[in-house]
Image (cartoon, rainbow, N blue to C red):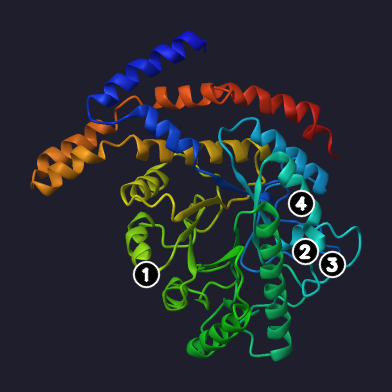
Amino acid sequence: MKYELIQKSYEIAKERYAGVGVDADKALDELQQISISIHCWQADDVTGFENLGNLGGGGIQATGNYPGKARNIDEIRQDVEKVLTLVAGSHRLNLHAIYGDFQGKIVDRNQIEPAHFAGWMQWAKEKGLKLDFNSTSFGHPKSGDLTLANPDKSIRDFWIEHTQRCRSISEEMGKFQNDPCIMNLWIHDGSKDFTVNRLKYRQILEQSLDAVFAQKYLNMKDCIEAKLFGIGLESYTVGSYDFYLGYGAKKQKIVTLDTGHFHLTESIADKISSLLLFTPEIMLHVSRPIRWDSDHVTILNDDVTELAKEIVRAEALDRVHIGLDYFDASINRIGAYVVGIRATQKAFLQGLLEPITKLREYEENGQYFERLALLEEAKGLPWNAVWDYFCLKNGIAVGEKYIAEIQQYEKDVTGKRV
């Protein structure tokens, strides 16, 4: 697409948006500031670099065996660097604890230290990235069905120690990058079939979390993530949304909303305004569930668009952290990254371009027909011309042009991995 055509289309779109009271230039400036925390585990199907042998399980499953996945830290970094050439803006990289640089040594999860992530910190600094972090409770000989909620003190203490160490690592990351590291805590704990001890396990989990969070830090932020169910743990999840919502509100922790961790008919967008009243901030893990938490690549669908719009409507961009969480191993992994990141940015652009001032005026005046009509008409406004101009301004591929770049990268790089 020629520069002149993109520029002309944007000027027309800009004028059209001005007609409904929207400043397109301002929307682009705000979109430029939105950072997305890109998940490292899409690059290698949640394998990591431990030498313990990832056992899988723990309520998650990566499906597919598309060739070319990253096999080591260097290849993950290479792939992420390629992704960053195809998306606009300044972003973050989200690491799981199993992605440390262990130098071929066996380092159990209750032994990990900031030194194992020093290389990641230096690399991120060189690439202009900030880091986020996650504890890893799944895929370990001590995972089983229960970790932090385990009645066995020895197992429970192992996972408490692991999570405490993850917080310490996050603190060092935050110090190094002079920006708080967001550390997410998700555990798979639950039961495949009925349990008569629902309260007991949740009491244990509360006590474990209190122990984990006892140390106060200044350079990291804690997030707690719920889940509806895990594979093989379908009947009961200790860390349910109700549990973490209550704990987060009581202890002033950030609650993570993973869009794949709720009933399919449940509106995650509707939760934003409630959480903002009672918790300090919100962490998003944007995914695409299909019948279950299947971690399909994020696309520009109604769920993601409404979620982004609600955040913008609440004027909460400074209180909501946006991350991705999917791991599709059935398609080109670089392509999966780029499609998901771009789709999320498009959703927020639509939110930023919404004629909210006029919509609120209609609502306050009880003009509900007018509000509905403008909401409908806004769907057809030329946001895609604004998006193309955003890509052009950032020097990245406009439209579908990135497909050819990813195909070439597959030919030159990932296709040669055995």
Counting residues from the N terminus, which is met first, the one under dot 1 or under dot 2?
Answer: 2
- Identify the image quadrant of the C terminus: top right
Q: Does 240 appear above or below 151?
A: above
Judging by the rendered image, the residue that carries numbered circle 3 is: 52
Q: In the image, what residue type sits under mark 2?
A: Pro
Bin the neighbour count of mark 1 within 10 Å (Cα to Cα): few under 14, some 14-19, many 20 and up. Answer: some
- Name the residue rendered at 86%, 63% in the picture: 51
Judging by the rendered image, the residue that carries numbered circle 2 is: 114
Q: Position of residue 206 (x, y in %)?
A: 53, 84
- Name the residue rendered at 58%, 21% in the picture: 401
Mark nearest the camera among 1 and 3 is: 1
Left or right: 321 in relation to 263: right
Left or right: 17 in relation to 226: left
Bin the neighbour count of mark 2 within 10 Å (Cα to Cα): few under 14, some 14-19, many 20 and up. Answer: some
Q: In the image, what residue type sits under mark 4?
A: Trp
Judging by the rendered image, the residue that carries numbered circle 1 is: 278
Q: Position of residue 17 (x, y in %)?
A: 28, 26
**Real-space Cα separation, disc 1 to disc 2, in angstroms:** 32 Å
Q: In the image, what residue type sits under mark 1?
A: Phe
Considering the numbered disc 2 on the image, is that residue within a helix, a strand or a loop?
helix
Judging by the rendered image, the residue that carries numbered circle 4 is: 120
The quadrant holding residue 145 is bottom right
Q: Are marks 4 and 2 in contact (CB under 8 Å)?
A: no
Counting residues from the N terminus, which is met first, the one under dot 4 or under dot 3?
Answer: 3
Q: Are marks 1 and 4 in contact (CB under 8 Å)?
A: no
Considering the numbered disc 1 on the image, is that residue within a helix, a strand or a loop?
helix
